[in-house]
Image (cartoon, grey):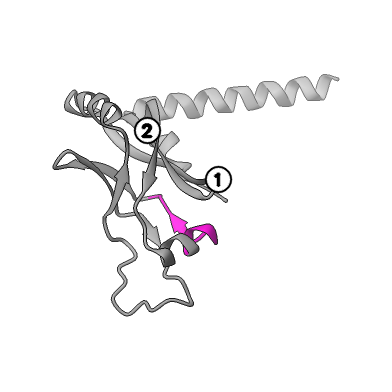
């Protein structure tokens, strides 16, 4: 099981990555292991010296009691204090924290977060232009072989 947020790589330039744990309920774990999680609009925030995952959608598990379940609730992230301090310094310098992927590591679910800087529109256009040129070069090389 590997759930990734591909849109982040288009909108942000990732400088550092960090693996953290998630605090979840049992029904949420079952739902995520079934692949029912969306990270597209999610982000990570510092609050009271702790990391929190905000706006990540975990679909309600079908066999659980979901009367009061909020699929976009705030979820606590677990990291070592040294890592938190290192990330806090970068966030104070104006960087953002984004959720990159969620995956299994043994029996545990892990979330990969990235320290990122948002790309400007002209940077996005340059990447698209380079990709188009590379694609044209590959087509020409394939045609001559």
Q: What residue is at 59 percent from the left and 23 percent from the top?
A: 133
124 lies above or below 57: above
Badge 1 is on which residue? 106
Q: Quadrant of residue 59?
A: bottom left
Say which mark, if any, is on residue 114.
2
> Residue 44 at what x, y percent from top left?
28, 43
16 shown above or below 40:
above
In percent of the image, x 21 and y 41: which residue is there?
A: 50
* Dot 2 or dot 1, earlier in sequence: 1
- Label 1 secondary element: loop
- SS at badge 2: strand
Eye-nearest disc, 2 or 1: 1
Q: Are marks 2 and 1 in contact (CB under 8 Å)?
A: no
Q: Position of residue 46 (x, y in %)?
A: 20, 40
Q: Spatial distance from mark 2 to mark 1, Cα to Cα? A: 22 Å
Query: Pointer 2: residues within 10 angstroms few (<14), some, or many (20+)?
Result: many
Q: Is residue 34 magenta?
A: yes
- Asked whether the viewer can see residue 118, the reply is no
């Amino acid at each position: 099981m590997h759930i990734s947020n591909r849109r982040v790589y288009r909108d942000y330039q990732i400088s550092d990555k960090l693996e953290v744990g998630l605090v979840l309920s049992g029904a949420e774990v079952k739902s995520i292991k079934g692949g029912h999680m969306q990270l597209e609009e999610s982000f990570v925030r510092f609050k009271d010296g702790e990391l929190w995952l905000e706006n990540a959608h975990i679909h309600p598990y079908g066999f659980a009691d979901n009367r009061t379940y909020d699929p976009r609730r705030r979820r606590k992230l677990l990291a070592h204090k040294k890592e938190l301090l290192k990330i806090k310094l970068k966030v104070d310098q104006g960087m953002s924290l984004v959720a990159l992927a969620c995956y299994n590591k043994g029996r545990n679910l892990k979330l990969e977060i990235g320290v990122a800087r948002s790309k400007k529109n002209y940077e996005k256009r340059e990447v698209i232009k380079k990709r188009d040129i590379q694609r044209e070069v590959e087509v020409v090389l394939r045609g001559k072989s």
